[in-house]
Image (cartoon, coloured by chain):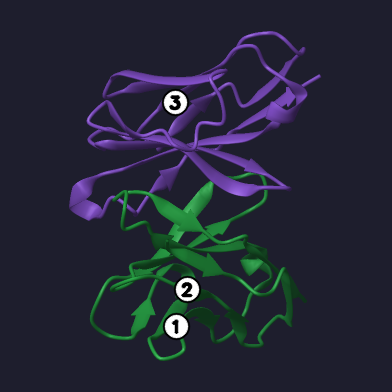
Chain colours: A green, B purple
């Protein structure tokens, strides 16, 4: 079965500092990996995805993610965090048994302080 | 485009009552997903449709839950009878194959409280 793990419940960072949200995955075969963000009282929003190709994927709002096959990781990064980046971030992997179905991680709360 | 539309946004009901949640996907999208989000269980996929046909309903918790998609523009999730443990935020999302079915657009959610 496919799964993702987000080892941190919360990440605290000062505005202007780099932000990293960690995700590791477990899949059989080639992974299809995703990041979504949820702002308070809102639905999830797609940020970026890795299907194949370049290990560094660029997405919305200045976010990027690095796919590392040897470490089975797909960490989300932003060089300079903004207070408005405070939100709940979800890593997800496509379910190989039921295409279209995503397995979401538990989520990481990001708090950016001024 | 208005995005995915869900109604109602908030619902408070008493145990035993029937609850119907509604969703209008983005026009042209051929996949529709129903999710439930709680603090305890996180985000769970309940069911998803492709071209109005249910593809995977393995996440539907019990027979009290049912979902329909009578046409490409409308879907319902019904709980009958409702129980306090059904209290959660229910999200509808849609996507289309051409953009990657996993690039899902979520609605604002329906916050359900069963007393």
Dot 2 falls on which chain?
A
In the image: residue A84, left or right of residue B71:
right
In the displayed structure, A76 sits above or below B51; it is: below
What crowding class fits label 1: few (fewer than 14 Cα within 10 Å), some (14-19), or many (20 or more)?
some
Q: Which residue is mark 3?
A: B23
Q: Residue at x 36, y 21 (%)?
A: B74
In the displayed structure, B46 sits above or below A50; it is: above
User: In terms of image quadrants, where is residue B55?
Assistant: top left
Q: Looking at the picture, tell me which residue is in the foreground, A62 or B66.
A: B66
Helix, strand or loop for disc 1: loop
Distance of mark 1 from mark 3, alpha carbons? 36 Å
Q: Which residue is mark 1?
A: A72
Q: Residue furthest bottom?
A: A70
Q: Which residue is mark 2?
A: A25
What crowding class fits label 2: few (fewer than 14 Cα within 10 Å), some (14-19), or many (20 or more)?
many
Q: Residue at x 33, y 86 (%)?
A: A55
The N terminus of chain B, quarter of image: top left
Distance of mark 1 from mark 2, alpha carbons? 6 Å
User: In terms of image quadrants, where is residue A57?
Assistant: bottom left
The C terminus of chain B, quarter of image: top right
The earlier-in-sequence mark between 1 and 2 is: 2
């Amino acid at each position: 079965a496919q799964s993702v793990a987000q080892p941190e419940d919360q990440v605290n960072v000062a505005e202007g500092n780099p932000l990293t949200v960690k995700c590791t995955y477990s899949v059989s075969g080639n992974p299809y990996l995703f990041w979504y963000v949820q702002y308070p009282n809102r639905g999830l929003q797609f940020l970026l995805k890795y299907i194949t190709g370049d290990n560094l994927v660029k997405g919305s709002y200045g976010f990027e993610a690095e796919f590392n096959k040897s470490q089975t990781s797909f960490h989300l990064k932003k060089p300079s965090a903004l207070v408005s980046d405070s939100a709940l971030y979800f890593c997800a992997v496509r379910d190989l048994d039921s295409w279209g179905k995503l397995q979401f991680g538990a989520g990481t709360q990001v708090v950016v302080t001024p | 485009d208005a995005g995915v539309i869900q109604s109602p946004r908030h619902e408070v009901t008493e145990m035993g009552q029937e609850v119907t949640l509604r969703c209008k996907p983005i026009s042209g999208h051929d996949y529709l997903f129903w999710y439930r989000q709680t603090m305890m269980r996180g985000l769970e996929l309940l069911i998803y449709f492709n071209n109005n046909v249910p593809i995977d309903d393995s996440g539907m918790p019990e027979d009290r839950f049912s979902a329909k998609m009578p046409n490409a523009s409308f879907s319902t999730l019904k709980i009958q009878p409702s129980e306090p443990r059904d209290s959660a935020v229910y999200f509808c999302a849609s996507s289309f194959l051409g953009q990657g079915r996993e690039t899902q657009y979520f609605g604002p959610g329906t916050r359900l409280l069963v007393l």
